[in-house]
Every structure is written in structure tokens, then in C-alpha cells.
Amino acid sequence: MFRKKPCSNELDLLAEKERALRDEMTRLESYIQGGAEKERSDQINTMPAPDELDEKRRHASFVDQVMSKKEIRNVKRHQAKSTILFLMLLLAIVSLGSWVLRAYTDYTASL
């Protein structure tokens, strides 16, 4: 029913284990906090791939040349318009080709 009081040796061992665990926890906490900062500084200090550098330089020079966002909007609108016209041209070519093919097959069938 009643437990025996632990010996001073057992108390000393438990206190030593507790101190070791607290030291380990402190070390791990500082490692975790320092790890996030180190990761952030590594990302900042790491050079991007050469392709990304070229792309960033090209984009920066493009942005320097562009006067305003309105010009960018105009370019996008023009590209969309050109795309629609190109698709309409392709549709007209396919339609004309099918009409010629149908006329040719009807002509050869009547011979």
C-alpha cells in the first residue's frame, strides 16, 4: 500500500535524466528555430537555374520597355484576335478542301 521512499541514488539518477532531457529539448528547439532561418537564407542565397535567370532578365527588359499596363492589355487583345483569325482561316481551308474533294468525287462518279 505504501511505497518505499526512493533512495537518493534513484533521485539523483532521475534528476540527471530530467536535466539531460531538458538539455536535449532546448537543443532541438534552437535547432528548429535556426533551421527555418537557415532555410530562408539558403533560398535567398541560392542561385536559380540558368534558364530562370535568362527568363527573368528577358522579362525585366520587357517590363522596362513597356510603358503601361494598357499596352500589355492591347498586346493580349491583339494576340487573341490574331488567334481567332488564324482558326477561322484554318476552318475556311478545311471547308474549301472538303468542298473540292466532294466535287471531285461527284465528277469522277458521273464519268
Image (tube, rainbow, N blue to C red):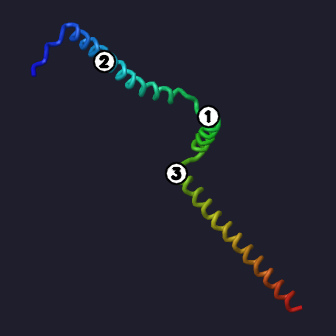
* Rendered location of residue 42, percent (x, y): 50, 26
Quarter of the picture containing the C terminus is bottom right
- Under mark 2, the amino acid is Leu
- Under mark 3, the amino acid is Lys
74 w.r.t. 93: above or below: above
Residue closer to the observer: 28 or 43: 28
Q: Is residue 101 rendered to the left or right of residue 35?
A: right
Quarter of the picture containing the N terminus is top left
Residue closer to the observer: 98 or 2: 2
7 w.r.t. 69: above or below: above
58 w.r.t. 14: above or below: below
What is the secondary structure assignment of the residue under circle 1?
loop
Label located before the other in sequence (1 or 2):
2
Task: Write the residue at 55% across / 28% down.
Answer: 46
- Under mark 1, the amino acid is Ala
Q: Mark 2 points at which residue?
A: 21
Q: Mark 3 points at which residue?
A: 69
Choose top left, top right, bottom left or bottom right for residue 27.
Answer: top left
Q: Is residue 34 rendered to the left or right of residue 5?
A: right
* Rendered location of residue 67, percent (x, y): 56, 47
Q: Residues within 10 Å of mark 3 (few under 14, many from 20)?
A: few
* Rendered location of residue 61, percent (x, y): 61, 40
Badge 2 vs badge 3, beta-carbon distance below 8 Å: no
* Distance between mark 2 and mark 3 Cα atoms: 59 Å
Label located before the other in sequence (1 or 3):
1
Q: How crowded is mark 2: few (under 14 residues within 10 Å), some or many (20 or more)?
A: few
100 w.r.t. 26: above or below: below
Label located before the other in sequence (2 or 3):
2
What is the secondary structure assignment of the residue under circle 2?
helix
Residue closer to the observer: 51 or 82: 51
Q: Name the residue under label 1.
A: 49
Please identify, in this view, whether the residue under mark 2 or under mark 3 is nearer the observer. Answer: 2
